[in-house]
Image: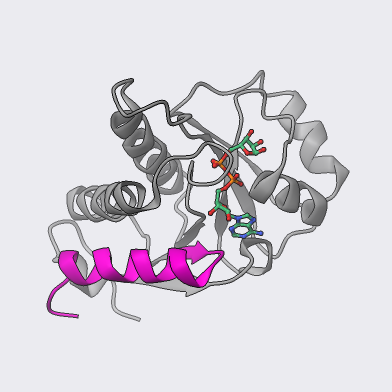
Amino acid sequence: MQEIKKGDKISTLRIELIKGDITKVMADAIVNAANSTLLGGGGVDAAIHRAAGPKLLAECATLKGCATGSAKITKGYNLPAKFVIHTVGPVWSGGKHSEEKLLAGCYSNCLSLAREHSLESIAFPSISTGAYRFPIKPASRIALNTVKTCLEKDPGVLKKVIFVLFSDNDLAVYQENYRDLFPES
Ligand code: AR6
């Protein structure tokens, strides 16, 4: 695989969109769309805790929660991924409560942690677009744009970013935004 250096065009980095279950993804880290307690919940959060086993919850309990838009890292325990990066997306409440900025913060803070830990691959779910009701179209645009911008600034050693979508419709929306953002692909 091609090595990514600072200043390289981001099209040389592989951003993949797949449909599937993020708990099955082999990546250095998978991202959890958590809540501010970091003590578990429904959706992808529940699936990750179920697959990782009880030690994940025990480590999360030592972290004293996480602010909306921020991120914290733990080990992956029984998951195929080495680490879980927990981030807290904004609850959609009409779009005038800094939701876009907070969602962008989730992606950029996860990538900062990936860089600090010299991770080569990371997988994201579609943060905030389930229980937190952020509309999928703007959410996917923010997700892809933020990742592209962060990686252009400094990808670290990251070689692969995978977006793991849970439905055909979510995948199609991400694909449409991806084509707009990477017209050469
Ligand atoms: N793999 C990939 N994506 C998944 C999976 C999975 N196994 N399961 C669900 N999704 P949500 P949020 C998708 O609700 O909106 C939790 O209770 C799902 O279809 O998991 O950020 C937390 O504790 C959707 O597209 O996260 C918080 O309280 C996306 O993941 C709250 O929900 C996000 O949906 C966070 O809400």
Up the image or down, 153 lies above or below 173; here it is above
Q: Residue at x 60, y 24 (%)?
A: 36
Task: Give coordinates of residue 122: x percent, y percent.
Answer: 48, 59
Q: Nearer the viewer, residue 85 or 106?
A: 106
- Horizontal placement of 7 versus 73: left or right? left
Q: Residue at x 46, y 29 (%)?
A: 70
Task: Give coordinates of residue 47: x percent, y percent.
Answer: 73, 53
Q: Nearer the viewer, residue 163 or 72?
A: 163
Task: Give coordinates of residue 115: x percent, y percent.
Answer: 39, 47
Q: Quadrant of residue 179?
A: bottom left
- The structure's colour scheme is one colour
- Horizontal placement of 53 versus 143: left or right? right
Magenta stretch contains residue 179: yes
Segment colored magenta: 163-185
Q: Check the picture and name the quadrant holding the N terminus.
A: bottom left
Q: Residue at x 27, y 47 (%)?
A: 146
Q: Main secondary structure of the magenta part?
A: helix
How many marks overall? 0
Q: Check the picture and name the quadrant holding the C terminus.
A: bottom left
Magenta stretch contains residue 55: no
Up the image or down, 7 lies above or below 133; here it is below
Q: Nearer the viewer, residue 185 or 121?
A: 185
Q: Nearer the viewer, residue 146 or 151?
A: 146
